[in-house]
């Protein structure tokens, strides 16, 4: 076990606040698509969408994207990359206001890959970024519009996000290497 | 052991045994159904000019202690109970309720059937009452002739600013009838708090470079306060996050175009389930309200309803659509009552931190 820096209550609050901030910035939830980056970003995206629906009593589209194809740190020659969007999902991003959701913002390379993945699906009106944790150490000029918690870290540390849907509990932990 | 009477505006009379002060007083009679925390209730400024009827059968058995004061000056006009105890078994309680009420010039009556009294008031609605020695015609004339002030906030609010130092966020607390639990919660979170009088202008507030504003609970109707208070809220919310509670919530709603109505039956207790709409979570909290925000008057353009009472369906919380400001009707700090929602203080400070980023 690492050191718990965000417990269940604090994570719920962070997602609640992000939800309200999305309504503030977006002036309502019309024309919105919530896009979660696999794996944990998807669960966070669904929770945010669920909250938006409860508050506004309107349907909110959620999409899950797989960014493996666009990552610059994996060897793409070995095997065929998974598709960005599951064939069964019919969500359009063209002309939409996209809220991209991920669990941890670190170097920014995942987000850059997500931008490429989203542009493969269409040309959104705009993209805003929501992350549960911003741990610093950016390698690209990327910043989040909605941050659950800023956690200063050293590069040696590992940040682990757990979500109840697949990990049985909600928490953010810092693990020493 | 002297016989004393509680007389009501509608002619009802209740006979009991006096304790506390021997004063004759007049106030609005309200029912409080909290099972615990009579000290917090009696010392809460929202009971200014009110006679508090406890439905909890026995009060006084944990004495009065220095940790549970919600204000130094106690403004309640009377305490009614089925039974009061002068024997305290609490290690902190070194003062009896009888002595405490004597010190503060508040009369009490015990031996009254408070369940019958509660029914009476629930059916007939809130009304004036007096605690008197003899329930003759003269006493009723006096009661009917007395006019209760509508300047309650001005009477209970601090006259000059005072600090409650800390090394965290710079918070301005507007005192409409502050209960100390608000200060305790902010202190616990290391806030550097400045308590300001109710009629402080937005310029005076902004000159202190605040990170966040808290609008305190308080007595009476929000409609008794001048437009300048609403103007202050409208100006301040554009610049810093606001957290309003109780009267502060009603004022925040008024400032943003909603309407307030007086409830037929005031609700004082902590037995109503309250739903947090965004998560469907049910919480319990101490509620003391005579007024409520009219849900039909809430504009979808600028406000979101965040909490509702599941029993009387009243709006219990709202949030602004354009600014990170919110308010709640209930009291989240457990002074007295449940602390299910005490993390609303964290939510407020996270709004503050998010804005400073």
Image (cartoon, coloured by chain):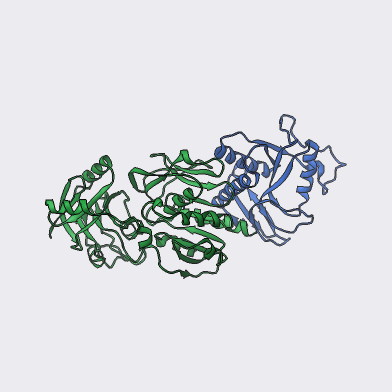
Chain colours: A blue, B green
User: What percent of the width, then of the height, locates residue A168?
Assistant: 58, 44
Quadrant of the drawing holding the N terminus of chain A: bottom right
**Residue B26 placement, left or right of A51:** left
Front-lying residue, B8 or B103: B8
Vertical arrangement, residue A123 with respect to residue A154, above or below:
above
Residue at figure coordinates x 41%, y 47% from the top left: B284
The reply to whether residue A83 is visible in this rendering is no
User: What percent of the width, then of the height, locates residue B176?
Assistant: 41, 59
Residue at figure coordinates x 42%, y 53% from the top left: B247
Residue at figure coordinates x 32%, y 50% from the top left: B34
* Residue extending furthest toward the right: A77
Quadrant of the drawing holding the C terminus of chain A: bottom right
Front-lying residue, B357 or B281: B357
User: What percent of the width, then of the height, locates residue B226?
Assistant: 43, 55
User: What percent of the width, then of the height, locates residue B91?
Assistant: 31, 66
The reply to whether residue B272 is visible in this rendering is yes
Vertical arrangement, residue B356 with respect to residue B167, above or below:
above
Vertical arrangement, residue B239 with respect to residue B293, above or below:
below
Front-lying residue, B330 or B340: B330
**Residue A29 placement, left or right of B20:** right
Residue B350's quadrant in the figure?
bottom right
Vertical arrangement, residue A22 with respect to residue B236, above or below:
above
Q: How many marks?
A: 0
**Residue A114 placement, left or right of B184:** right
């Amino acid at each position: 076990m690492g050191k718990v820096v965000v417990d269940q209550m604090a994570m719920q609050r962070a997602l609640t606040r992000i939800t309200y901030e999305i309504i503030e910035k977006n002036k309502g939830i019309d024309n919105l698509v919530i896009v979660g980056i696999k794996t944990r970003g998807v669960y966070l995206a669904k929770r945010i969408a669920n909250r938006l629906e409860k508050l506004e009593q309107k349907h909110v589209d959620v999409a899950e994207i797989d960014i493996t194809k666009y990552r610059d740190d994996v060897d793409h020659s070995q095997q065929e990359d998974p598709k960005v969007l599951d064939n069964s999902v019919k969500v359009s991003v063209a002309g939409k206001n996209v809220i991209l959701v991920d669990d941890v913002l670190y170097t920014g390379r995942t987000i850059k890959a997500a931008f490429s993945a989203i542009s493969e699906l269409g040309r959104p009106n705009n993209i805003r970024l929501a992350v549960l944790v911003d741990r610093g150490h950016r390698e690209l000029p990327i910043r989040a519009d909605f941050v659950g918690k800023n956690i200063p870290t050293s590069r040696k540390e590992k940040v682990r996000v757990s979500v109840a849907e697949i990990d049985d509990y909600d928490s953010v932990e810092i693990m020493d290497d | 052991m002297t016989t004393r009477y509680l007389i009501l505006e509608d002619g009802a009379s209740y006979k009991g045994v006096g304790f506390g002060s021997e004063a004759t007083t007049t106030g609005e009679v309200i029912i409080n159904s909290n099972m615990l925390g009579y000290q917090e209730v009696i010392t809460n400024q929202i009971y200014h000019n009110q006679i508090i009827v406890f439905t909890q059968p026995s009060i006084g058995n944990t004495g009065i202690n220095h940790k549970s004061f919600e204000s130094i000056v106690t403004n309640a006009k009377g305490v009614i109970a089925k039974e009061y105890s002068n024997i305290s078994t609490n290690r902190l309680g070194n003062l009896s309720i009888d002595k405490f009420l004597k010190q503060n010039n508040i009369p009490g009556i015990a031996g009254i059937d408070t369940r019958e009294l509660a029914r009476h008031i629930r059916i007939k609605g809130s009304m004036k009452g007096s605690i008197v020695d003899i329930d003759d015609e003269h006493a009723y004339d006096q009661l009917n002739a007395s006019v209760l002030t509508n300047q309650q906030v001005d009477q209970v609010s601090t006259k000059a600013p005072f600090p409650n130092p800390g090394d965290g966020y710079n918070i301005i607390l507007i005192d409409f009838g502050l209960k100390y639990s608000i200060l305790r919660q902010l202190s616990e979170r290391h806030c550097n708090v400045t308590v300001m009088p109710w009629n402080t202008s937005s310029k005076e507030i902004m000159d202190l470079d605040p990170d966040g504003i808290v609008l305190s609970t308080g007595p009476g109707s929000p409609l008794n306060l001048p437009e300048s208070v609403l103007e202050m809220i409208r100006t301040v919310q554009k610049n810093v996050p606001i957290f309003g509670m109780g009267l502060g919530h009603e004022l925040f709603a008024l400032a943003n175009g909603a309407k307030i109505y007086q409830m037929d039956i005031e609700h004082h207790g902590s037995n109503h389930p309250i739903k947090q709409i965004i998560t469907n979570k049910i919480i319990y909290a101490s509620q003391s309200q005579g007024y409520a925000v009219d849900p039909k008057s809430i504009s979808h353009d600028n406000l979101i309803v965040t909490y509702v009472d599941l029993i009387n369906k009243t709006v219990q919380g709202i949030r602004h659509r354009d600014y990170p400001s919110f308010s709640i009707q209930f009291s989240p700090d457990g002074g007295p009552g449940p602390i299910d929602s005490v993390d609303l203080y964290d939510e407020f400070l996270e709004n503050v931190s998010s804005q400073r980023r």
